[in-house]
Image (spheres, helix red, strand yellow):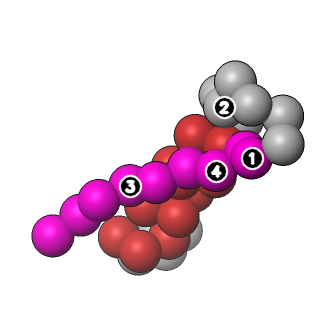
Amino acid sequence: MERPSLESLVMDFAMSLTRRATCKRFQVGCVITS
């Protein structure tokens, strides 16, 4: 099994955040990394 890249993990987390959005019109997620 191959380890997922950091970019892939962060994108998956951002997509998970969209499901927690309270506004049905603008379901967005943002993750700030360095």
Nearer to us: label 2 or label 1: 1
Residue 31 position in % (x across, y down):
38, 55
Q: Of tags 4 and 1, which is closer to the observer?
A: 1
Q: Is residue 8 left or right of residue 31?
A: right
Task: Report the number of discs.
Answer: 4
Identify the secondary structure beneath mark 4: loop
Residues at discs 4 and 2 in contact (Cβ within 8 Å):
yes
Q: Secondary structure at mark 2?
A: loop
Dot 1 crowding, Cα within 10 Å, few <14, some 14–19, many 20+: few
Residue placed under numbered mark 2 in the picture:
21
In primary-sequence order, the first of circles 3 and 1 is 1
Q: Mark 2 or mark 3: which comes first in sequence? A: 2
Which quarter of the figure has residue 16? Answer: top right
Residue 10 circle label: none
Q: Which residue is mark 1?
A: 26
Residue type of the residue flagged with mark 2: Ala
* C-beta proximity under 8 Å, tags 2 and 3: no
| Amino acid of disc 3 | Val
Q: Main secondary structure of the magenta part?
A: loop
- Left or right, 12 with respect to 2, comes to right
| Residue where numbered disc 3 is placed | 31
Return the residue at label 4. 28
Q: Which residues are magenta?
A: 26-34
- 28 shown above or below 11: above
* 6 shown above or below 16: below
Q: Residue furthest left?
A: 34
Instruction: Give percent across and percent down for residue 33.
Output: 24, 64
Q: Are marks 2 and 1 in contact (CB under 8 Å)?
A: yes
